Structure formats: structure tokens, C-alpha cells
Image (spheres, rainbow, N blue to C red):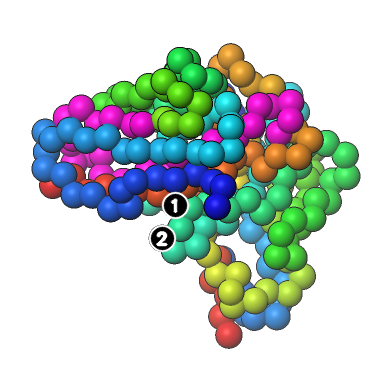
Amino acid sequence: NAGVTQTPKFQVLKTGQSMTLQCAQDMNHEYMSWYRQDPGMGLRLIHYSVGAGITDQGEVPNGYNVSRSTTEDFPLRLLSAAPSQTSVYFCASRIQARLDRLSGRGAFFGQGTRLTVV
Amino acid sequence: AQSVAQPEDQVNVAEGNPLTVKCTYSVSGNPYLFWYVQYPNRGLQFLLKYITGDNLVKGSYGFEAEFNKSQTSFHLKKPSALVSDSALYFCAVRFPYSGGGADGLTFGKGTHLIIQP
């Protein structure tokens, strides 16, 4: 089925460990984003990409890196995990703004990765 | 800076009664407005959006939302609530054609909707 796929679904890390959260979409969407969801804070934008080779920071980028070598994939890297990074992470993708205005739904979301840093 | 407020952490409604989940926004210009729903352990699902045109927007699962420009509000409504509507609801805003800047959705904090049998 077409959509946004995130792996893993659950992960426990020790403080200081590194890991990569994977995100892949098969809809040929140009825009991809990473959000974190924390209780009482909604979703906050970490990083986003408007196309292969182009990334930029969102609202809460510290402690995270991204790259966009292909249209399909947008991995999120935690270089040195901290307990403050315990959260649920969502990857999202969407078509370009002009087409989204006509028929889009803002963004398609993956099912999330629940990360616990101990 | 754009912001979205959902003033209620939780809304309780009896099954069969009408429901309203409130959302107000603060942004200049003409934003795009969205509602998403999140069921437990799932990602966000699109419900509806307002771009332009009629102030009353109809979406999935019988939900609708009313855009009020003067009050900068975009409240989510449903005439008759179902127990299965119980979930976490997010209002979101984005500027149109935002490609060079922060190209992302700004979300409210979410409102837990609980429908009681």
C-alpha cells in the first residue's frame, strides 16, 4: 500500500547512543518532514526537506541530523541520545504546494516511532 | 510567527449529542487550515482542510469545520457524536506556497475528545 513507512516502531536507547530513524515514502512526494510529539505540546517540526539534496531546520532541530539523498528516503539521526529526546517521532510527506492546494491533505503521516532514552 | 491554540485539553460529549472542538489561530495573511485525528498508537489522519471559498468545510467521518476569519477560528463540529469518534484531534495551520521558509505545519497542542456511551 502506498504511504509513509517508519521503522522501527519502538526503540529504547541508552544515553549517549546513536541511532537512525528510517522514513520512506512511495508517493513521489517532494516534501518530507520530521516531527516529534510530546504530551501537551502537539507536534513540533524538527527538520524538513523540499527535495532530494535539500534540507532545513524546523522548530526543534538540536540533537538531530537529516539527509535526503533520494526522493523516497528521509532518515533522522540522533547523534548522542539524551533523555529529553524521549518522544514519539512522526515522518510526513506531501506533494508540492500548488498541487496540495487543489487536492492534497496537508501531509501524509507515518505511524510513528516511539523512542525512549534511559 | 504563526501559532495555533486549542483551548481545551479534553472535551466530553455524550453519544448522539453534537460536538465542537475549538481552534483559533494567529497568523497574518490567508493560511491553510487543517484538522487531523490521531487514534491510539497510530499516525495522524487527515480529516478536512480549508483553503478558500465556503466557510463551512465538510470532511471525513461526518465531521465539518467552520472558518471564521474575523474571529480567526476554525472549530471542528459534528452533529451527532459516536463512541468511535473518541480520539486526539489536532488543528494545524500552514501558509500557502511556503517553500523557502519553514515549510511545515504548525500544530495546536491537541484536544482529547471523549464520547461517553
Q: Which mark is residue A53?
A: none
Span shown in magenta: A75-100
User: Residue A47 lies in magenta, yes or no?
Assistant: no
Determine which quarter of the picture holds residue A56: top left
Cα gap from disc 1 to disc 2, whole angstroms: 7 Å
Residue B101's place in the image compared with B114, above or below, is: above
Residue B92's place in the image compared with B26, above or below, is: below
A12 or A39, which lies in front? A12
Q: Which residue is mark 2?
A: B41
Residue at image position (59%, 38%) is: A27
Q: Which mark is residue A111?
A: 1
Which chain is indicated by disc 2?
A: B
Measured as percent of width and height from the top left, residue B51 is found at 77, 37
Which chain is indicated by disc 1?
A: A
* Circles 1 and 2: CB atoms closer than 8 Å: yes
Residue A60 relative to residue B68: left or right: left
The answer to whether any part of residue A38 appears in the image is no
For badge 2, the amino acid type reads Asn
Secondary structure at badge 2 equals loop
Residue at image position (65%, 76%) is: B82
* Quadrant in the picture for the N terminus of chain B: top right
User: Residue A94 lies in magenta, yes or no?
Assistant: yes
Measured as percent of width and height from the top left, residue A81 is found at 18, 35
Badge 2: residue crowd in 10 Å (few <14, some 14–19, many ≥20): few
Badge 1: residue crowd in 10 Å (few <14, some 14–19, many ≥20): many
